[in-house]
Amino acid sequence: MREWLRWPVLRQLTGSDPLGRGRAARSAETDREYARTEDAEAVVGSVCPYCAVGCAQRVYVRDGAVTQIEGDPDSPVSRGRLCPKGSASRSLVTSPDRQTRVAYRRPYGTEWEELDLDTAVDMIADRVIRTRDETWQETDSDGTRLRRTMGIASLGGATLDNEENYLMKKLYTALGAIQIENQARI
Ligand code: SF4
C-alpha cells in the first residue's frame, strides 16, 4: 500500500470510521501492542505488601519473571482494585535499584559497605544481647518485680504479614521488651 494511503485523516474521511475513534485511529504499531497479561505462563495469587489494607493481587509470570501485577477481582477486600502504590509494586521485584545485599554504614562512617548476611545477623544478635544486659530492670525502686528492658523497642512496618508480626511479638516479649508497635496500627 502506498504510504500516503495510510494517512489517518484519509482513512478517517474515506473509511467506515468518520469520527476517528476506532480503526482509523489505529496504526500497525497499535496492532502490535498487547497486554502484558496475555502471554503470561502462570498467574499467582498474592497480597500487596505496602500497607495494612491487604489488597489482593494477581501476579503474572513469564520465563520465571514477574511481568505484571494487577488487582484480584475475587478479593472481598479490594474487589480488583489497587492504589498507585500497589499498581506499581512490580518494580519492587524487578527494579534495577532493588537492594539485594546488606548495606552497612559504620558509626561515623561516610560510605556504605556490603556485608554478608551471616556477619550482619551476628552483629545484630551481639547488639541485642548487649543492650538487653545493659538495660535489664529486674525490679523498680519499690522492689516490685519488672523483669523487662526499656532499651529495646520495635516498630514494624506494614509490609510485615500476620505470621511475621506474630513471631516478632513472641521474640520481643521473650526478650523482655515491652515497646512493640506496628506502623499499620498508628
Ligand atoms: S494497593 Fe494500596 S491500599 Fe491496597 S494494600 Fe497496597 S498500598 Fe495498601
Image: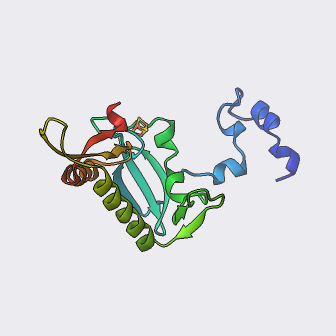
Who's the residue at 62% across and 59% down the image? 109
Q: Position of residue 158 (x, y in %)?
A: 37, 42
Q: Position of residue 34 (x, y in %)?
A: 57, 52
Q: Is residue 178 left or right of residue 113?
A: left
Q: To which quarter of the image does residue 110 belong? A: bottom right
22, 182: nearer the viewer: 182
Figure check: 104 above or below 22 = below
- Res. 125 visible in picture: yes
Q: Position of residue 123 (x, y in %)?
A: 42, 66
Number of marks drawn: 0
Who's the residue at 82% across and 36% down the image? 10
Q: Position of residue 29 (x, y in %)?
A: 71, 51
Classify the position of the C terminus by image quarter: top left
Colour scheme of the rendered structure: rainbow
Figure check: 34 above or below 100 = above
176, 164: nearer the viewer: 176
Who's the residue at 86% across and 51% down the image? 2
- The quarter of the rendering in which ligand 1 is drawn is top left
134, 77: nearer the viewer: 134
140, 153: nearer the viewer: 140
Who's the residue at 39% across and 39% down the image? 51
- Res. 79 visible in picture: no
Q: To which quarter of the image does residue 155 belong? A: top left
Q: Is residue 99 left or right of residue 129?
A: right
Q: Is residue 161 left or right of residue 99?
A: left
Q: Is residue 91 left or right of residue 28?
A: left
Q: To which quarter of the image does residue 54 belong? A: top left
Q: Residue furthest left?
A: 144
